[in-house]
Image (cartoon, helix red, strand yellow):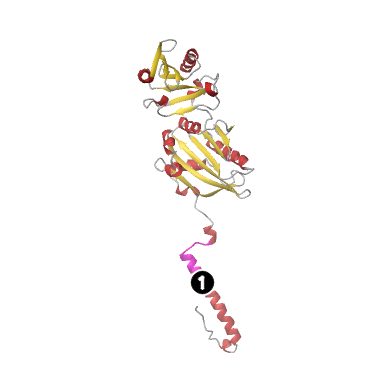
Amino acid sequence: MVSFECVSPLCANSSTSGKRNRVLAVVVLCGVLAGCNRSAGQPPASQQAQAPPLAAALPDSARSLLGWLPADNGVPGWLRAGQPRHFGPGTLWEHIDGAAETYLGFGFEELVTVDYTNAATGLQVTVDLYRMSDAVGAFGIYAQETNPAAEFLAVGAEGYLNGTALNLWAGSCYAKLTSGKDHPSLAAALRALAADIGTRIGADAKRPVQFDRFPTVGLVAHSFKVVPKDVLGQSFLTGGFEAEYGTGKAAWRLTLIPFEGAEKATAALTRYREFLLSNGRVTKALSAPVKGGFVAQDSYYGLVVAARSGAAIAVALGPPSEQSGLDMVTRLLK
């Protein structure tokens, strides 16, 4: 510790006064040294409180995703906690190892994930917002993970609440909201956060138009599926759309596969017929009202009715009868 001796004549006449002055000098010097240390190192407290923007570390392509997530108190009481995390096609496995390949198959482009906290309830909710290449991919991954027994909600294009999680899709985005613990107010909080996200995205709330072609009679609710590859279990068939009909043991599937032209559709149908010949038997050729097709028996699905019209193939797997299968594929191909 550095100290100063008082050399004034007045100090010489009073030892008490001298001690007081020495203490005062030490206090002043400490203040000066503290100021020096602060200017050379940490900024003042007023500046330290000004954290960098949450989007500072994100690439430009991901900032719009962050803008579609609730701001602090955008949903009253909910604040962002910590920095957002960003993942691309090459790093997605770090966040969802084991499921990354499925997301990539549906056209995954990037993910922003943000934690939210509520001081009043002590709850934390993590929001994962996935951007897919298009609305078909976004609906596809949403439908892939849909629980038909969940409570479906009018948030975004559609969403569903299942325990401590709420999933929704809108436009080319798929959002997953999850919490690590249950709470009486959690369901309402998830709904509010999801509604805010859906409104911010503001995308057209429509499922892929291909599903508008599917007959509604006997259709199982929330059974639509996008099949990006290996449609009907065949590696040469890609980009399919499926729905389930009937119930219980009588349930069966209807599949639509669009192609770029009639020639490619015809070639694919011929190849599928050859596969069924090697794994079952073809019992009848079809020519009307469709533009070609067949009825077959498959070792796994049983009755199969497949047909083509224009640049699309429709296949009924396990329908109740040959005639009902033909009726449904014909309606699907119109």
Q: Amino acid at mark 1?
A: Val
Query: What residue is drawn where x is 62% and y is 40%?
Result: 188
Near-viewer residue (220 or 6): 220
Q: Is 333 inside the magenta-drawn segment?
A: no
Query: Can residue 265 be seen in the rendering of this structure?
Result: no
For residue 279, above or below residue 25: above
Q: Which residue is mark 1?
A: 32
Q: Percent x, y for residue 174?
A: 50, 36
Query: What residue is drawn where x is 46% and y is 25%?
Result: 241
The residue range painted magenta reads: 30-44
Helix, strand or loop status at disc 1: helix
Query: Can residue 36 be seen in the rendering of this structure?
Result: yes
Q: Left or right: 290 with respect to 245?
A: left
Residue furthest to the bottom in view is 13
Q: Is 31 inside the magenta-drawn segment?
A: yes
Near-viewer residue (238 or 84): 238
For residue 46, above or below residue 170: below
Q: Percent x, y for residue 185?
A: 64, 43
Q: Percent x, y for residue 48?
A: 52, 58
Near-viewer residue (247 or 16): 247
Q: Residues within 10 Å of mark 1 (few under 14, many from 20)?
A: few
For residue 300, above or below residue 189: above
Query: What residue is drawn where x is 48% and y is 18%?
Result: 332
Q: Percent x, y for residue 262?
A: 38, 18
Prevailing secondary structure class for the magenta stretch in the rendered image: helix
Q: Quadrant of residue 161?
A: top right
